[in-house]
Image (cartoon, helix red, strand yellow):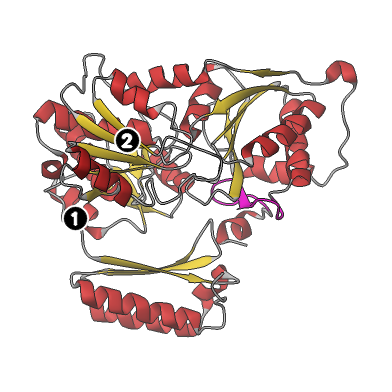
Amino acid sequence: MNSDRLKNGRKYFGTDGIRGRVGEHPITAEFCLRLGWAVGKIFASEGSRLVLIGKDTRISGYMIESVLEAGLVSAGVDVRLLTPIPTPAVAYLTRTFRADAGIVISASHNRYDDNGIKFFDSRGNKLPDEMELAIEQQMEAPLVTVRSSELGKVERLEDARGRYIEFCKGTVDRRFRLRGLKVVVDCVNGSTYAVAPRVFSELGADVTVIGAEPNGMNINEGCGSTHPEAMAEAVVAAGADVGIALDGDGDRVIMADGDGRIVDGDELLYIIASHWSRTGRLSGGVVGTVMTNLGLERALRQGRIPFARADVGDRYVLEAMRDRNWPLGGESSGHIVCSNLTTTGDGIVSALQALVPMVETGKPLADLKTGMTKLPQSIVSVAAEDPDSVSGCGAVARALGDVEAQLDGRGRVLIRPSGTEPVVRVMVEGEDPDLVAGHAHALADVVRSSGQAAAPP
């Protein structure tokens, strides 16, 4: 159980909905049926009648969709089914169809045999903690189907992708064109396979597409934002100007310059923030996370752009952005939120925002990030049966303090439980890459020997 659940008293909802291995609790047909019914009961009690369901390309998505649909309908809620489509598209369509909620079936960047369910409210925002807790409480009640005359109705929306493509193109100036730009797009065999290539080609780019042949089991397999090397190699092979690697549900993006060098989420944030600042579009500052590279913070400070850190997870980034009324935030993983354009992370929209300064200045992506120098950073993941308990271990705390003393303000150390996997992340950042790696592995050894670590799966 992660700290988010402990903090909010929830049993199933984590930092990004409910996620797990398909066929194992809670990602089972029985659980998802009850979940759909509970969600329907909660929304129906508030007079709501319409819920959209979208999914990525995992083979299990159709099973989960069908039982969620049955649960919602049995509670008296109407359902509109979407074709495989990105998570941010569901958020957008929930707003435009005036639906009361949107449901996404996806495990994002995880393997195909994982899956998950996450929710948006009528405005395309993540559900508040109170609503998630109410859904969990409703799941404890007996499942009772409404009368036949009150059952929900189901329709499949056929034009969902086209609507979302037009939305993405509408996030840049109507005169903006990508003519003369060669772009590699890695759709990771996921939910963007039928939309991302069209967005960039309709804006005038010469597009080379990889990872656009989903078979239900190859999502995120050796490609996409978690394995951007495939995209980078394709950029070099095609002689392209830039590469774009998305993730399974389309809310993250990692890019590559014309020489195949990876440009991660921190660097993309710098590129977008710098351009917005120069053009007067950045009202406020930028929100990163505790994992954001110190190089970004230093570069933004040099450009007199305010910066703040939030806990890892898009919900915490968004909360910090709303608290400060700032329009830009994100994570090193490429989960970037442009809240003046959309309500959630969107890989296609974020990529377009990074391409705008390339087109307007005529500079390659490599030149746009030269004002930021990343510090060497080493992250080690340690499998743990109870990740949350590691932070309270005295031996771990002492080792962490020793490393901080040795860095003497010239770097950062962080040990944190993952919000999506049973692992502890050990992160060390500093000026000497060998020293940073040594500290990270030494701290990981302390975590493993603390009595909390588990044998690797």
Q: Which mark is residue 185?
A: 2
Residue 178's place in the image compared with 358, above or below, is above
Q: Secondary structure at mark 2?
A: strand
Q: Which mark is residue 298?
A: 1
Q: Secondary structure at mark 1?
A: helix
Q: Earlier in the sequence, mark 1 or mark 2?
A: 2
Q: Quadrant of the C terminus?
A: bottom right
Q: Which mark is residue 8?
A: none
Does the rendering let one see residue 176? Answer: yes
Q: Residue at x 22, y 19 (%)?
A: 176
Q: Residue at x 26, y 39 (%)?
A: 243
Between the residue at mark 1 and the residue at mark 2, the CA separation in whole angstroms equals 31 Å
Residue 171 location, quadrant: top left
| Left or right of residue 150, residue 315 in this image | left
User: Is the magenta region chiefly helix, strand or loop?
Assistant: loop
| Left or right of residue 159, residue 341 in this image | left
Q: Amino acid at mark 2?
A: Val
User: x, y (%) of residue 194?
Assistant: 44, 27
Region of the chain picked out in magenta, as a range: 12-26
User: x, y (%) of residue 183?
Assistant: 24, 33
Q: Amino acid at mark 1?
A: Arg
Mark 2 crowd level (few <14, some 14–19, many ≥20, 10 Å Cα)? many
Does the rendering let one see residue 325? Answer: no
Depth-wise, is mark 1 or mark 2 nearer the camera? 2
User: x, y (%) of residue 30?
Assistant: 79, 45
Q: Quadrant of the N terminus?
A: bottom right
Is 25 in the magenta? Answer: yes
